[in-house]
Amino acid sequence: ESEPPEDARGEARASGGAKKALASLALLIVGSAVVVALPGASPQVNVLCSAALGGVMAYGGLKKKSLNWSGALAAVMVGAVSLAANAVFGSVLLAFFISSSALTKYGNERKARIEDGHKAGGQRDWVQVAANGGLPTAFAGAHIALRGLSAPVFDAAADPVSTALACAYLCYYSCCAGDTWSSELGVLSKAEPILITTLRRCKRGTNGGVSPLGTGAALGGGLVCGAAAVGFGTLAAAPASGAVWAALPLCVGAGLFGSMVDSLLGATLQFSGFDPVKGKVVNKPGPGVTRISGLNFLDNHAVNFVSALITSAAGAAVGLWLM
């Protein structure tokens, strides 16, 4: 059978992309409505709706291939706890998940030519979901244990524990968003990246490589999380109290800071080498692989976790000072 003409294939891809964009928009609208309304509902309704929306998010990630089955099951738990906690936590999770899933699919063909082991859509497994969502889910659980299903207090004098937990949660996901945005867009930059430890040009795909596009994207990831926290923290049926506005600069700073920490760890403790057979940068040493930078000590999951852990701790400290 003859293949359809290129124009027809292009129209089909455009139509498919438009449908996926509309599906993501629909999820964002439904999720936003639930996040705003849930704080005013009974605890039972809150928990049930949060679990359902967590399941919808996981199913959407599975269908779009941004999650595999183990990642989807882990995402249900992460989503349910954060969405049930309060509007601020739920909105930041939605902002991170939807924006990062969309960017992971952007430029797949180019990324496959650059990145070793690239998977279309990302296909995150439970390890990656845990690295991105395990600790903030624990923060959300601790917040529920201390304050119940109530809005956070951004006031260090009135409630330092709640303030620290909320800031740590926001900064963790802002770091993850900044790193994801930076990685997914930075690798597509026309300019060659610069290795953060030497400030010299390096090959695309090198761990620790930074570019103006990637750095700007890291700020954008933090900005989206901060805007979600401030917007939904203000509009929710049970709004957050205290210096809610301070969440915006805190999240923007966390997106940039976290991305830089991730790049520094990647350049020093994660191996990067060039494989002439594959013609790509690889993350493990092997026959014929020429080392570019980094020790073979941490893998990508560990780098993501450590950088987000450092950012959340720093964010909690800065938040207590700022608020």
Image: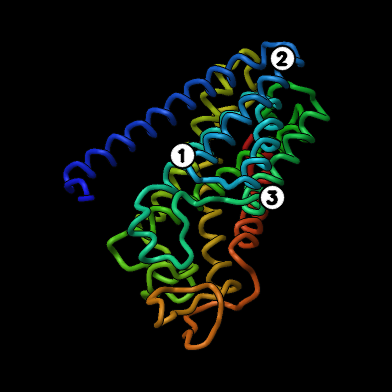
Coloring scheme used: rainbow
The amino acid type found where label 3 is placed reads Ala
10 Å crowding of disc 1: few (<14), some (14-19), many (20+): some
Residues at circles 3 and 1 in contact by the CB criterion of under 8 Å: no
Q: Which mark is residue 99?
A: 1
Locate residue 314, reporting x and y percent: 65, 50
The residue lying at 70 percent from left, 46 percent from top is 134
Residue pointed to by mark 2: 45
Residue at the location (64% across, 22% down)? 240
From the viewer's perspective, tell me whether residue 145 is left or right of residue 36.
right
| Residue of label 3 | 313
Near-viewer residue (242 or 200): 200
Give above or below for 158 relative to 34.
Answer: below
Residue 313's place in the image compared with 300, above or below, is above
In x, y percent, where is residue 155?
A: 69, 29
Q: Earlier in the sequence, mark 3 or mark 1?
A: 1
User: In the structure shown, which secondary structural element does the residue marked by tag 2 occupy?
Assistant: helix
Give the mark, 3 or 2, whose residue is nearer the N terminus: 2
